[in-house]
Image (spheres, rainbow, N blue to C red):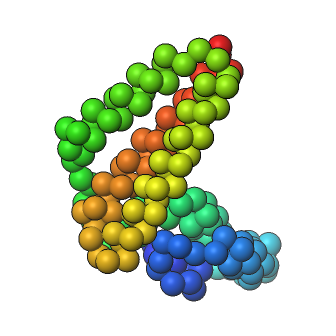
Amino acid sequence: MIINYFELFNIPAEFKIDVKTINDKYFALQKEYHPDRFAGKDEAGRLQALQTSADINEGYNILKDPIKRAEHLLSIHKVKDVNPSQNFLSEMMDLGEALEELGNDEAIDNFISDLTYMLDESLDEFAAAFTSKDFETAAIEIVRAKFIARLIENAELHKVII
């Protein structure tokens, strides 16, 4: 069973949400359901509190991360994984190869800046597609966003190596 973390946090199931709201809800829920508050309960009550606390932590980690939040929204709507097009795969391969050819920190920083712009663009496209219930496009944009985010991580590592 999929836990709907939007319901757990009592916030609308939307992509664009205020991170401060997530933080505030998280701390309020943790205060209410912290296992130490249930120390005097029976074992079942303590275990339930422990599980609820774990669910709150997992929900917080998902909701505060835009890619994980988007994936969670898609899973709530039972959207299946999509197979990227050949053009998409070629574009991603070209970006990966471009990273390998970069030879200095400045070039890598510029590449990261371009990738960050592409990531923001992809997340905006996800938001628009999701809002209009075009779940296939939304799913494709999240695959793209995940790939770009991995490229950004790889570029940061590449910078350390060279």
**In the picture provided, is 43 more to the left or to the right than 86?**
right
Is residue 95 shown to the viewer in this render? yes
Count of marks placed on residues: 0
**In the picture provided, is 73 more to the left or to the right than 111?**
left
Q: Quarter-wise, where is residue 24 in the image?
A: bottom right
Image spot of residue 100 (x, y percent): 48, 18
Up the image or down, 69 lies above or below 88; here it is: below
Q: Quarter-wise, where is residue 30 in the image?
A: bottom right
User: Quadrant location of the C terminus?
Assistant: top right
Foreground residue, 113 or 151?
113
Foreground residue, 85 or 3?
85
User: Quadrant location of the N terminus?
Assistant: bottom left
Q: Could you tell me which residue is drawn at 24 percent across and 45 percent down?
A: 84
Image spot of residue 134 (x, y percent): 27, 71
Up the image or down, 126 lies above or below 105; here it is: below
Q: Could you tell me which residue is drawn at 42 percent across and 41 percent down?
A: 147
**In the picture provided, is 89 more to the left or to the right than 157?**
left
Image spot of residue 95 (x, y percent): 41, 31
Q: Quarter-wise, where is residue 18 in the image?
A: bottom right
Image spot of residue 48 (x, y percent): 60, 75
Q: Could you tell me which residue is drawn at 49 percent across and 50 percent down?
A: 119
Up the image or down, 156 lies above or below 2; here it is: above
**In the picture provided, is 108 more to the left or to the right than 120?**
right
Is residue 54 shown to the viewer in this render? no
Up the image or down, 95 lies above or below 36; here it is: above
